[in-house]
Amino acid sequence: MLALARGFLERKGLGEARLEAELLVAHALQVDRLGLFMRLDAPIQGAEVDLARDCLVRRGRREPTAYIVGQREFFGRDFAVGPGALVPRPETELIVDLARERIPAAKTAGLRVADVGTGSGCLAVTLALELEGAVVDAIDLSEEALAWASRNAESHDASVSLHRGEGLEKLEELAGVGGPFDLIVSNPPYVEPTERELLSPEVREHEPPLALYAPSADPDFWARGLIELVPRVLKPGGLLLVELGHLQGQRVHQLAEGSGARSAEIVDDLAGVPRVLALVR
């Protein structure tokens, strides 16, 4: 089954055919990848063949593997994901790394954290677990996304409050009610609609447009809006972390430096791409 799956995916032109074959066959057999290799000589039942075939056909049509198996790993934890929520990306883990590096462990109790555009909740849930005692609010406009975030918060027993609303407005509202935040994070939509055809079929045909495309075809919309809100929603000395597209770094850095921030820098991801704005009020 593994050999057939790998061959099928290779013929479909998928670059990680071996890994994806293992993930899809393991899903069909209801085991993890380690369990898969522990039972290579086990007989396969007809229902398992049918499920594996269905998974492979869906993948051959370029549906994201994460949607097919129903989960994606993020920061060492499995997160439920499906249509209506952006698939968690490895580069977004940099936001968690920076938060852990720059906020002393002794000061996380009672820390007020906001995640703007939470999607599957991978950032909000992870920060609630990694920053012990933090109080986390997660915002999204999409009811579908919030349903996934709620599921993930529950499955990981993470204390996260979910709020539906437009990100900037809801962030300012929450700061007005509970006081400014110590940490604000966001992985906002920053793809220009004109770049749609440059995206892989998995992304452009399956992931939610609301989580992908920048409003008004302005890739800096969210970064600019968050920077402008900093005086009203972030405590002095508070930290803002915003994920950026690969061409945004220089423009957003200039916006941040012109805002009167105590410090502002663009941090590269592991691939050397300018990825995250780190701003201190």
Image: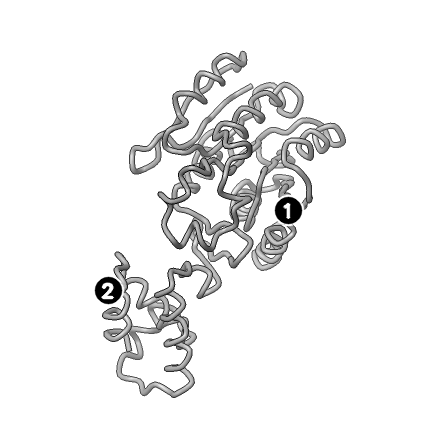
Local crowd size for mark 1, using a 10 Å CA cut-off: few (<14), some (14–19), many (≥20):
many
Image position of 152 (left or right of 58): right
Amino acid carrying label 2: it is Glu
Image position of 25 (left or right of 139): left
Vertical comparison of 175 with 97: above or below: above
Image point 63% across, 55% down: which residue?
Answer: 147
Secondary structure at badge 2 equals helix
Secondary structure at badge 1 equals strand
Q: Is residue 68 visible?
A: yes
Local crowd size for mark 2, using a 10 Å CA cut-off: few (<14), some (14–19), many (≥20):
some
- Residue 228 vs residue 189, the one in the foreground: 189
State how many labels appear.
Answer: 2
Quadrant of image for the N terminus: bottom left
Image point 55% across, 54% down: which residue?
Answer: 84
Quadrant of image for the C terminus: top right
Image point 33% across, 33% down: which residue?
Answer: 273
Q: Which mark is residue 160?
A: 1
Vertical comparison of 242 with 150: above or below: above
Vertical comparison of 144 with 246: above or below: below
Residue 209: percent from left, percent from top: 52, 46
Q: Which mark is residue 200?
A: none
Q: Is residue 187 visible?
A: no
Image position of 200 (left or right of 160): left
Query: Which residue is identified by label 2?
Result: 10
Residue 214: percent from left, percent from top: 51, 35
Q: Earlier in the sequence, mark 2 or mark 1?
A: 2
Residue 213: percent from left, percent from top: 50, 40
Mark 2 to mark 1: distance in Å?
A: 41 Å
Badge nearest the viewer, 2 or 1? 2
Vertical comparison of 174 with 122: above or below: above
Amino acid carrying label 1: it is Val
Residue 235: percent from left, percent from top: 63, 22
